[in-house]
Amino acid sequence: MPEPIDPTERAHLRDDEGYSPPIFRFAPSPGLGDVVRRYWLPVWDLPAGRTTVQRVLQYPVVMIVVTADYARCIGPSTGLSTQELRGRGWAVGAMGQPATGALVLGGPVSAITDRFVDLDAVPGLDGPGLTAGIRTAMADAPDTESSQRAVVDHLEHALGALLPVDEEGLLVNAVVERVEADSSVQRVSQLVEAFGMSERTLQRLCARRIGLSPKWLVQRRRLHEAAERLSGDDSPDLARVAVELGYADQAHFTRDFRTVTGLTPGGFAGEPR
């Protein structure tokens, strides 16, 4: 039975006023760890005229997202992912593992990098059935645990059909896990050495299974770490943060952060929390 979790989500930058709607998160059942990272269910009720733009530095994974208005398979975003919220609403999401995208799509994830497809168009899932089950469960009381567990059960049943994960999928899961868990990985050559493959083979693997480059993986991990450090209570020493993240200097760090988020590190650090 999936259990509620409340991880510190360093990928979620909130809006520029520091607001985030309540987000209920569940861990997958132990047997689904190869295809699911977690389930997430934001529920919001904003005053009339109030809008919020939630910002996320996505992970290198495909997400299944169902709301009252749409149902999508969303590819990884090379930049900053944003979503405007207003009024009352809810969303149900499943964050896949790196291996999952190709299993859902029946082909390379590069086909939906920086874009999405309707859930009923993907061959690996029963999109219409999954969508109908989730909407029925969330129709009356989306903020109750009983409704949330019901939709997680629907997702578990659908995603469980993708098992077992193929060897290439398990390999790309391991590559991404290594980058995200080990901050000493600063260069693609370290991954090449660790996994005993050529750089070209690694590039092709990442292109097929996650629609991104190995270099992107390292850069995104750095930006996740940067966002986490810049969100602290104390004013950060930006030069020190740059060095600790493996940048040659603060200017390179600032350029990378601003290119992806549209903000300088200092500007982001100064936002309300």
Image (cartoon, rainbow, N blue to C red):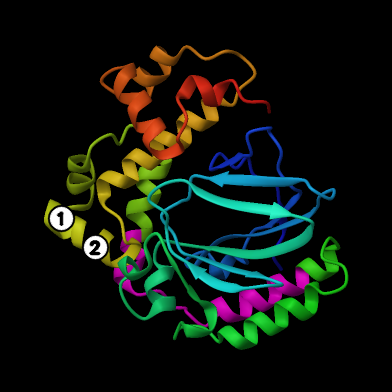
Please tell me which residue lies in front, 42 or 7: 42
Q: Position of residue 126 (x, y in %)?
A: 56, 87
Magenta highlight range: 149-172
Q: Label 1 amino acid?
A: Met
Residue at 24% across, 62% down: 205
Residue at 79% across, 56% down: 87
Above/below status of 141 relative to 163 = above
Which quadrant is home to the N terminus? bottom right
Left or right for 153, reference 227 = right
Report the mark closest to the observer, 2 or 1: 2
Mark 2 and mark 1: Cα distance apart in space = 10 Å
Secondary structure mostly seen in magenta is: helix
- Residue 147 is tagged as none
Q: Label 2 amino acid?
A: Leu
Residue identifier under label 1: 197
Where residue 88 sits, quadrant-wise, is bottom right
Q: Position of residue 30 (x, y in %)?
A: 59, 65
The local crowd at label 1, few if under 14, some if 14 to 19, many if 20 or more residues have their Cα within 10 Å, is: few
Total numbered circles: 2
In the image, is residue 268 part of the stretch drawn in magenta? no
Residue identifier under label 2: 205
Left or right for 153, reference 208 = right
Please tell me which residue lies in front, 29 or 97: 97
Q: Position of residue 43 (x, y in %)?
A: 77, 57
Instruction: Name which of mark 2 and mark 1 comes first in the sequence.
Output: 1
Marks 2 and 1 in Cβ contact (< 8 Å): yes
Q: Secondary structure at mark 1?
A: loop
Left or right for 115, reference 85 = left
Q: Secondary structure at mark 2?
A: helix
In the image, is residue 155 part of the stretch drawn in magenta? yes
> Can residue 81 be seen in this snapshot?
yes
> Can residue 246 be seen in this snapshot?
no
